[in-house]
Structures are given as structure tokens and as C-alpha cells.
Image (spheres, grey):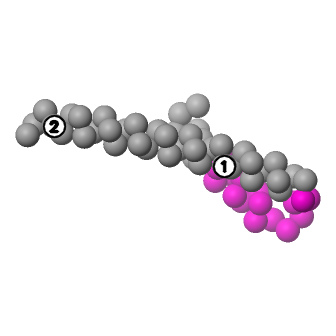
Amino acid sequence: MNYTEAFTELQQLVKQMEQADVSVDELAQKIERAGKLIQICKDKLVKTEEEIAKIAEQFE
């Protein structure tokens, strides 16, 4: 899963969780999935930041 896919799914989950008609069980599942998606996004951002820093070092 790439960053864009994870972020898009995360946005959809947030919208769903904001609705008052989500059951507690469903909410717990959505929160768990959101946590996994956040970790995916964070990992991708960290990796990208490291790659950019490596490229920037070449120009110093």
C-alpha cells in the first residue's frame, strides 16, 4: 500500500467515525485500522525524508 492509498483510506475512516450511527464494535475496528494506516503513512514519510536528506547531501 502506498502513502496516497493509506491516507485516502484514513480520511474515509475518519469521516465514518464522525458519524453518530457507528456501533462501538465497528468503531473499535475502525480505530484499529486507522492506527495501522497512520503507521504506514508515518513510515512512508520517514523513508521519504531520509531519501531526500541523502540526495541533498550530494549537493553540499
Q: Position of residue 41 (x, y in %)?
A: 53, 44
**Mark sitting earlier along the chain (2/1):** 1
Element type where label 1 sits in the image: helix
Kindly indicate the quadrant of the structure image that contains residue 14. Answer: bottom right
Q: Position of residue 26 (x, y in %)?
A: 87, 52
Q: Position of residue 25 (x, y in %)?
A: 90, 53
* Disc marking residue 6: none
* Main SS, magenta residues: helix
**Residue position marked by numbered label 1 in the rendering:** 35
Q: Give the CA separation, mark 2 to mark 1.
A: 33 Å
Who's the residue at 81% across and 65% down the image? Answer: 19
Q: Amino acid at mark 2?
A: Glu
Who's the residue at 32% across and 38% down the image? Answer: 50
Is residue 23 located in the magenta-colored stretch of the structure? Answer: yes
In this image, 17 relative to 12: left or right?
Answer: right
In this image, 8 relative to 48: left or right?
Answer: right
Q: Amino acid at mark 1?
A: Gly
Q: Which residues are magenta?
A: 8-24
Residue closest to the eye, 38 or 12: 38
Residue farthest along the left direction in this orientation: 60
Element type where label 2 sits in the image: helix
Q: Is residue 4 visible?
A: no
Q: Position of residue 55 (x, y in %)?
A: 21, 34
Query: In the picture, which quadrant includes the C terminus?
Result: top left
Is residue 58 located in the magenta-colored stretch of the structure? Answer: no
Q: Is residue 1 above or below residue 22?
A: above
In this image, 55 relative to 15: left or right?
Answer: left
Query: In the picture, which quadrant includes the N terminus?
Result: top right
**Residue position marked by numbered label 2 in the rendering:** 57
